């Protein structure tokens, strides 16, 4: 398969997607086809559906996640 944007070759990789809800963030590892040239990502429809489901559950605080750290912002 080739990239629709640049024609580059696609390879299957595990990638990290960030799902946010206001100031809260969750990093989700999913499989994607990634273009070797422009790095465009292509997801199977089931993956997209799962990311949407994760975001909805994240907003409802129903994922049972465990906090593993904190993120801070510094404005100078």
Image: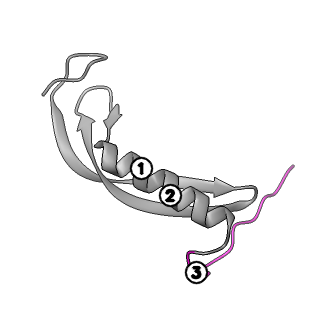
Query: Pointer 3: what residue?
Result: 68
C-alpha gap between disc 3 and disc 1:
26 Å
Q: Residue at x 15, y 28 (%)?
A: 9
Check disc 2 and report the residue beneath it: 53
| Relative image position of residue 18 (x, y in whole percent) | 53, 54
Q: Which stretch is magenta? A: 63-76
- Residue nearest the observer in this picture, 60 or 16: 60
Q: Position of residue 75 (x, y in %)?
A: 85, 51
Residue at horizontal 18%, vertical 46%? 12
Residue holding disc 1: 49
Whole-angstrom CA distance, mark 3 to mark 2, is 22 Å
Judge left or right: residue 17 versus residue 75: left
Could you say which is closer to the camera, residue 28 or residue 61? 61
Residue 63 in percent (x, y) is at: 56, 75
Residue situated in front as seen by the camera: 73 or 33? 33
Q: For this view, does 66 lie left or right of residue 6?
A: right
* First-in-chain label (3 vs 1): 1
Q: Secondary structure at mark 2?
A: helix
Report the magenta stretch's main SS. Answer: loop
The reply to whether callout 1 and callout 2 are in contact (CB within 8 Å) is yes
Quarter of the image where the N terminus is located = top left
User: What's the CA distance linking mark 1 and mark 2?
Assistant: 6 Å
**Callout 1 crowding tier (Cα within 10 Å): few <14, some 14–19, many ≥20:** few
- On the picture, is 29 further left or further right than 19? left
């Amino acid at each position: 398969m080739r990239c629709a944007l640049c024609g580059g070759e696609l390879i299957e990789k595990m990638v990290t997607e960030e799902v946010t809800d206001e100031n809260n963030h969750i990093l989700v590892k999913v499989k994607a086809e990634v273009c070797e040239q422009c790095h465009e990502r292509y997801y199977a429809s089931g993956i997209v559906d799962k990311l949407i489901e994760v975001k909805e559950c994240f907003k409802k605080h129903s994922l049972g996640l465990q906090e593993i750290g904190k993120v801070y912002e510094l404005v100078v």
